[in-house]
Amino acid sequence: MPNEPTVWEAVKDVYARFVADDGLPLAGNIAFRTILSVFPFLIFLTALAGFIGNAQLAREVVTFLLDSGPAELIEPLVPEIESILGRPRSDFLSLGILLTIWTASGGVDSVRVGLNRAYDLREHRSWFILFAQNVLFVLAGAVILIVLAFLIVLAPVMITIVDAHVPALHDIVAAYEKLRYPVAILVLTAGVFAAHYILPARWLPFALVWPGVVFTVIVWIVLAAAYSIYLARFATFASTYAGLGGLIAALFFIYLSGAVLILGGEINRAIRKRKEAAVGE
């Protein structure tokens, strides 16, 4: 009976697989395509919210997302984001909005490639199926964020009604507004789960997926806090990149986040391989 591998040996195995699968170059691809797709996605989100009759929803959900992120990372991008959200969008069904969907889907596609490599899966689906999957992923994300915006907008209304009719419940309902960060973490976790379930070349069981997802979310939270402190006290992006400092800071953070996402898939694959080896003994 072979000796059980130590934790250190398991860590070395995951790292070796991460390097062999070009984890850092793939993370760079994810970062570039994500930055490329963020603003088109915001345009699409604004147009979709306006199409259903309330463009303010887009601003509410973007404000929610901005408030939930590291302030030092978000603040340099706020003027550009507000500029985009402040423009009327009436071209929902035009070629322009289709182009923004295509660009936004590129960020999803880069995550798919990274997870396929991490799970050692060979892509067998046609380009049309993959493109349709990416677009649906973008659409679903936009709809979910708009539903979330409804809940955000609803909170003040609920508090007003409760104060008028059931004052005793004020504290309970008011606590709803304090759920910003838990809800943000829940949305983040659901998004990572969806990426691991939907994007890879084959369906993966929950027992295989959850360790990497939990690892990714926890490391992302720690990374966001640490990066926020770094930007506030030590970063020199502004002096090095001048007006591009905020964009470079965001690009580097997404680069690290992409590496963590791929590493989560590598951890899941390592666990799967060890389980398969244990069954074969």
Image (cartoon, rainbow, N blue to C red):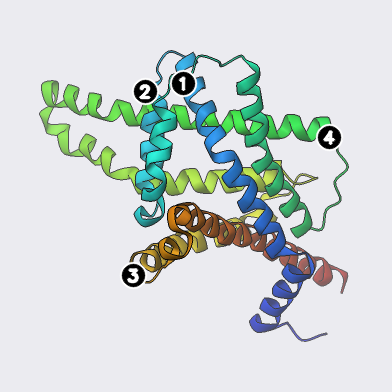
Residue 69 makes an appearance in the image? yes
Q: Confirm or deny contact between disc 1 and disc 2 (CB under 8 A).
A: yes
Please state which amino acid type lies under the numbered disc 3.
Answer: Arg
Q: Confirm or deny contact between disc 3 and disc 2 (CB under 8 A).
A: no
Name the residue carrying label 3. 233
Position in image of residue 239 (x %, y %): 41, 64
Mark earlier in primary sequence (1, 3): 1
Please state which amino acid type lies under the numbered disc 1.
Answer: Ala
Name the residue carrying label 1. 49
* Foreground tag (4 vs 3): 3
53 up-or-down from 59: above or below:
above
Q: CA distance from mark 1 to mark 3?
A: 38 Å
Name the residue carrying label 4. 127
Please state which amino acid type lies under the numbered disc 4.
Answer: Trp
Mark 3 secondary-structure assignment: helix
| Circle 3 Cα neighbour tier, 10 Å, few/some/many (<14 / 14–19 / ≥20) | few
Q: Confirm or deny contact between disc 1 and disc 3 (CB under 8 A).
A: no
Residue 143 makes an appearance in the image? no
Position in image of residue 220 (x %, y %): 50, 59
Mark earlier in primary sequence (4, 1): 1
Position in image of residue 63 (x %, y %): 36, 37
Name the residue carrying label 2. 56
